Amino acid sequence: MVPFLDVKAINERFSAELESAFSEVLQSGWYVLGEQNKAFEREFSAYCGVKHCVGCANGLDALRLAIKALGFGAGDEIIVPANTYIASILAITDNLCTPVLVEPNLETYNIDVNLIESHITPKTKAILVVHLYGQAVDMQKVWELAQKYHLKIIEDSAQAHGAIYQSKRVGSLGDVSGFSFFPGKNLGALGDGGCVVSNDEALIQKVRALGNYGSHIKYENLYAGLNSRLDEIQVAFLRIKLKALDEDNKRRQEIARMYREHIYNEHVILPQCVSEESHVWHLFVVRSAQRERLQEHLRQSGIQTLIHYPIPPHKQQAYKQYNHLSLPITERIHKEVLSLPISPVMSEEQVSVVIESVNAFRG
Ligand SMILES: *Cc1c(COP(=O)(O)O)cnc(C)c1O
């Protein structure tokens, strides 16, 4: 049996440390916005190579708060890849902005940077890049366009903690970046969590206030904010797991290398990566014209796979106003993708079982 992702096994590696962190927070008597948060904000911003970080309740809130803090609202357009996880789009529409959906590159699954310029209008305020499946977006073109048209760059880094582009980590590639610490992410808490990072101190202070009832000073409300904070207990856990993040990502990269070297099947298209360090393999996503049959074949070998994602945002019932759009590459991706198991706790034997079973698929 090869589970898709064994989060219990991932966390059990840190049992002793997690338990002692729990005791420490319990004994401190301080559970929201305390010393653990301050320390994590320093450690995680240093990890990303940015100046500032603020915790929040989850990855969706990180993006919602980032867009709100930038001051965008009704009538503003934000460019975003059409094949992203729904949260990237929800963060835009929740702020009453209009998502302008751009097709991805079929090889990398990331936004096709050559299609961005033709979608820019006088209403465009930002480009929201998503480092999908763990691979950093090819930012050079995005930087040039942002400069030329005076646009902000927002990164959705929820799947790509630690990925590197031109020697810089994800989170430091735009004006502001949102991360998720959902348990299944490369850096996961034991519950929900997220954060916003940026080099812009004023922006981060605004996010901090917006996530704390709109308040910089207790009982004085500058904005109509929300309550979106990161618990001390989750932060204490994250600080332990952050120390293992680079090792964990390295193991994911090793597994991806084995898959890419040893999977040979005319019915299966492997994912492309631009450079070894640019991809931290949150997901290993193959394509097949016979996706359902491939999934069933692997299931019969005891291999659990998932589909990320079965329905693109513009075909969701929640977004009826976009249902008419034709985005053929995005639609094709959603019909063909299949995510193979990948995680830092997979054994060599499990990796071999996956390789052999994919290779044995006869279409
Ligand atoms: C997980 C995820 C989010 C949202 O994070 P949550 O913590 O689950 O709210 C946003 N964008 C992408 C690409 C994600 O994978």
Image (cartoon, helix red, strand yellow):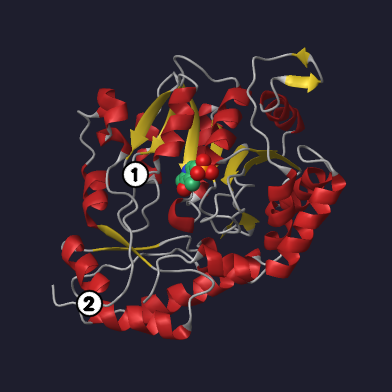
Residue 157 visible in the picture:
yes
Q: In which quarter of the view is residue 208 placed?
A: top right
Q: Residue at x 44, y 19 (%)?
A: 123
Q: Looking at the rendering, in which quadrant would you find the N terminus?
A: bottom left
How far apart in space, not on screen, are marks 2 and 1 (Cα)? Answer: 25 Å
Q: Which label number is shown at residue 16?
A: none
Across and down, in percent, residue 83 comes to 34, 44
Q: Is mark 2 within 8 Å of ligand 1?
A: no
Instruction: Tell me: residue 21, above or below residue 256.
Output: above
Please name whichever residue, 348 or 3, is drawn nearer the observer in this view of the structure. 3
Mark 2: few, some, or many residues within 10 Å (few <14, many ≥20)? some
Across and down, in percent, residue 122 comes to 44, 18
Instruction: Tell me: residue 129, above or below residue 247.
Output: above
Please name whichever residue, 164 or 73, is drawn nearer the observer in this view of the structure. 73
Q: Secondary structure at mark 2?
A: loop
Mark 1: few, some, or many residues within 10 Å (few <14, many ≥20)? many
Q: In which quarter of the view is residue 119 placed?
A: top left
Residue designated by label 1? 83
Q: Residue at x 56, y 27 (%)?
A: 67
Residue designated by label 2? 265
Say left or right for 9 vs 362.
Answer: right
Q: Residue at x 23, y 29 (%)?
A: 323
Residue 249 visible in the picture:
no
Q: Secondary structure at mark 1?
A: loop
The amino acid sitting under disc 2 is Asn
Across and down, in percent, residue 42 comes to 79, 48
Q: Residue at x 57, y 72 (%)?
A: 250
The amino acid sitting under disc 1 is Asn
Say left or right for 30 vs 129.
Answer: right
Please name whichever residue, 234 or 164, is drawn nearer the observer in this view of the structure. 234
Q: Looking at the rendering, in which quadrant would you find the C terminus?
A: bottom left
